[in-house]
Image (spheres, rainbow, N blue to C red):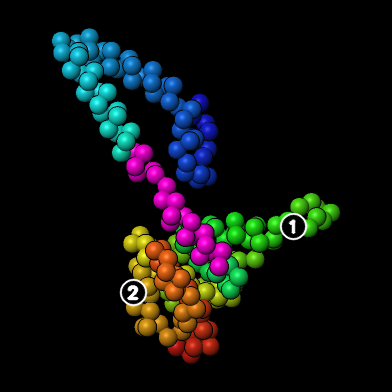
Amino acid sequence: MSIPALYAYTVPALDTRYLYTLFPMFSVLAVLSIDRIIWKLDKSNIIIVIIVSAIIISSVLFYDYKKIDYEHEKEAFEIMNKISTIINGTNVLYPESSYFVTSQTIQQWPSTYTERGLFTKFDIIVIPTDNFNSLEDYIMKFKDKGLTHIMIDDDEDRQTFLKEVFVNEKNFGYLNKIYDSKWDEFAYHVKIFEINYEYFNNVD
């Protein structure tokens, strides 16, 4: 029963639905544990009320934590769909940058049939920013591998060097801002910069 969840979180495919198969086992273990506790104590009614209350409260809190912000998702898709026509290679901005695939699929639908079947071409290169502490090092590493733009949003969990560009964009002369989601009055704030490699190479 635990194999699907183990596989999903190893890939990773971090979705709580893969844990649902474990619920029967957890339920049996929980009932046995509760029964043993109640058997040892006199105030069984109070314990049952406490346990039921804890389950309800934790369920509500978990639901609120996992609740999807549909307005944010809608804006993120609209923004990625718009900029997908003007960029070639950019940094990962998870999970929002995953909408590039959806956008390009829609733009090419219906795709033409080839001998290999239905074919959808994904042109945008999305490059991870893991293990980098400097924007200059990141650009140097991938400038010959298709990196053309830097994409930054207002998420506080982004890398420090990306947040620095978001706040102090004027300090980076080799970045030319070509889009700001505030121009379209979106609540989700994203900035797109084109890398001026001629300027960057001179600075470097």
- Element under label 1? loop
Q: Give the dominant element type of the magenta stretch: helix, strand or loop.
A: helix
* Tag 2 and tag 1, C-beta contact below 8 Å: no
Q: Residue at x 38, y 79 (%)?
A: 169
Could you classify mark 1 by the number of other residues whose Cα lies within 10 Å: few (under 14), some (14-19), or many (20 or more)? some
Look at discs 2 and 1 and give the one toward the viewer.
1
Q: Which residues are magenta?
A: 62-82
Marked residue nearer the N-terminal end (2 or 1): 1
Q: Alpha-carbon distance for marks 2 and 1?
A: 41 Å
Residue 23 sits in which quadrant?
top left
Question: What residue would you read off at disc 2?
Answer: 167
Q: Is residue 36 left or right of residue 118?
A: left
Q: Is residue 104 left or right of residue 137?
A: right
Q: Residue at x 42, y 47 (%)?
A: 68
Q: Is residue 202 above or below residue 178?
A: below
Could you classify mark 2 by the number of other residues whose Cα lies within 10 Å: few (under 14), some (14-19), or many (20 or more)? few
Q: Position of residue 148 (x, y in %)?
A: 55, 75
Amino acid at the residue labelled 1: Ser
Q: Magenta stretch containing residue 67, yes or no?
A: yes
Residue 188 sits in which quadrant?
bottom left
Q: Is residue 197 left or right of residue 164?
A: right
Amino acid at the residue labelled 2: Val
Q: Position of residue 63 (x, y in %)?
A: 36, 39
Question: What residue would you read off at disc 1?
Answer: 111
